[in-house]
Image (spheres, grey):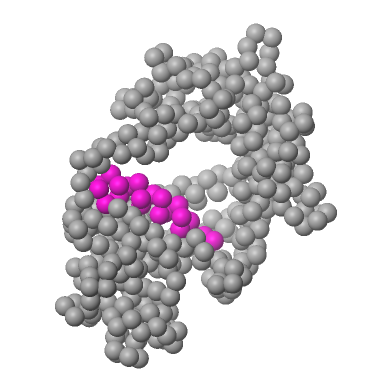
């Protein structure tokens, strides 16, 4: 066993909800008003010079606006940062051909503002773990004659002990739809298991097969994306049928869609880590897709109409982060590596040629005559990236397994991953 400091978020209920609800409502409504001011400002800048301001530009422009002073300065900065990130995400999707993507809308339900999540950074809160209290700073405009903060009494799960954490970095006030709750973003020292073994596995992420795994013990697995694609088509259709993309019904659909994606990512990461422990895998090498949208000249790639749409439906970085923190608890190390040329290189002889990938699911080497599943071939190449040449010698390894991966599907009834033949129809 070893100790390690890791980021964690702990949820807490409010014991004095009725006393602080009014203050938190005021802050939540103020967050939405500031978002809307920023949204209007970005639109105006875009219409004039076709430029999306960065969050520091928005902050500099709006820091003298009266809505900016409704919140603590750090809380206002976080609202504008979220807005800038949302606009850049939308622009990236549109640039890559996703015609379904819409720019972030105004936060309004009819004539009312919804309650936005408010983030309090180190200068915006004061934590009293001895009495389970936290003071959340108000903005200049929302202070009243007797108090410039909301004093919240919180209650965490019995297994959460905030006084023992390394540090609480942020506190978020989150409206769940019927009540407020607090999220404490912390750094926590935890015990992690020793590595279960010394073998390795390579993971190739993609937009058809979400993950292909190649193990050192000459086994391979495919995790198709069928259930997520079904959700994508279903929710996109129903959201498009809403009268307003920012309506309460549309937001409910977005929230449900997001929750289902999140569960998929967590279930898949948990399943992979369990497989690693069982197979005594101590190291995961995973393809880094951070540059998947650009080519070697930093120009946007064209993946085709459906490919461009699919590419933005799957949060590769998010999954890698989830996998990393689940793996580290079991002593398994996760190493992102470049995927460059792994799809067109033979994992057996090293021959590199575009034409070897004869179709999407098949790889045939014209040099050593290897026949393999294309995604598994890529995963095996990724597995080999950090290894020394002597460790990846094919002399003592067969290659028939590269063409015969097992398929593991997500069973919606149980919410877990099982071999294809065990999925219930």
Is residue 326 in the magenta section?
yes
In terms of image quadrants, where is residue 30? Answer: top right
Magenta stretch, overall SS? helix
Q: Nearer the viewer, residue 158 or 273?
A: 273
Identity of the residue drawn at 42% across and 85% down = 353
* Residue 336 x %, y %: 39, 59
Residue 234 drawn in magenta:
no
Residue 77 at x, y percent in the picture: 64, 36
Q: Nearer the viewer, residue 395 or 290?
A: 395
Which residue does the image show at 44% across and 20% down from the upper left?
154
Residue located farthest toward the left when viewing the structure as drawn: 396
| x and y percentages locating residue 418 in the rendered image | 27, 59
> Is residue 156 in view from this perspective?
yes
Say above or below: 93 vs 40.
Answer: below
Q: Which residues are magenta?
A: 311-332
Is residue 220 in view? no
């Amino acid at each position: 066993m070893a100790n390690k400091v890791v980021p964690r978020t702990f949820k807490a209920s409010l014991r004095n909800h009725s006393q602080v609800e009014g203050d938190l409502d005021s802050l939540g409504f103020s967050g939405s008003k500031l978002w809307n001011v920023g949204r209007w400002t970005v639109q105006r800048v875009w219409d004039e010079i076709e430029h999306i301001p960065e969050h520091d530009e928005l902050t500099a422009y709006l820091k003298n606006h009266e809505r900016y002073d409704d919140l603590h300065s750090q809380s206002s900065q976080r609202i504008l940062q979220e807005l800038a990130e949302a606009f850049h995400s939308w622009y990236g999707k549109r640039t890559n051909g996703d015609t379904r993507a819409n720019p972030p809308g105004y936060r309004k339900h009819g004539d009312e503002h919804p309650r936005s999540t408010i983030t309090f950074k180190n200068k915006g809160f004061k934590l009293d773990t001895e009495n389970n209290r936290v003071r959340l700073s108000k903005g200049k405009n929302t202070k009243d004659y007797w108090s410039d903060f909301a004093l919240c009494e919180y209650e965490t799960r019995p297994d959460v002990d905030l006084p023992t954490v390394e540090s609480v970095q942020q506190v978020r006030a989150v409206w769940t739809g019927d009540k407020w709750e607090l999220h404490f973003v912390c750094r926590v020292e935890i015990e992690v298991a020793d590595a279960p073994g010394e073998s390795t596995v390579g993971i190739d992420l993609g937009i058809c097969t979400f993950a292909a795994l190649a193990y050192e013990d000459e086994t391979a697995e495919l995790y198709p994306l069928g259930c997520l694609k079904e959700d994508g088509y279903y929710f996109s259709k129903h959201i498009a049928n809403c009268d307003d993309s920012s309506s309460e019904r549309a937001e409910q659909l977005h929230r449900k869609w997001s929750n289902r994606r999140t569960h998929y990512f967590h279930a898949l990461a948990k399943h992979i880590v369990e497989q690693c422990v069982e197979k005594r895998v101590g190291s995961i090498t995973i393809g880094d897709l951070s540059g998947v949208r650009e080519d070697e000249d930093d120009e946007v790639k064209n993946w085709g109409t459906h490919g461009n749409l699919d590419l933005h439906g799957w949060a590769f970085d998010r999954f890698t982060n989830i996998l990393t923190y689940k793996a580290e608890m079991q002593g398994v190390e996760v190493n992102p590596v470049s995927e460059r040329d792994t799809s067109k290189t033979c994992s057996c002889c090293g021959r590199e040629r575009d034409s070897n990938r004869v179709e999407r699911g098949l790889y045939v080497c014209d040099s050593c005559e290897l026949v393999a599943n294309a995604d598994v071939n890529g995963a095996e190449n990724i597995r080999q990236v950090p290894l020394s040449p002597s460790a990846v010698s094919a002399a003592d390894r067969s290659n028939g397994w590269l063409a015969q991966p097992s398929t593991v599907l997500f069973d919606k009834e149980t919410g877990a991953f099982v071999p294809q033949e065990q999925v219930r129809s």
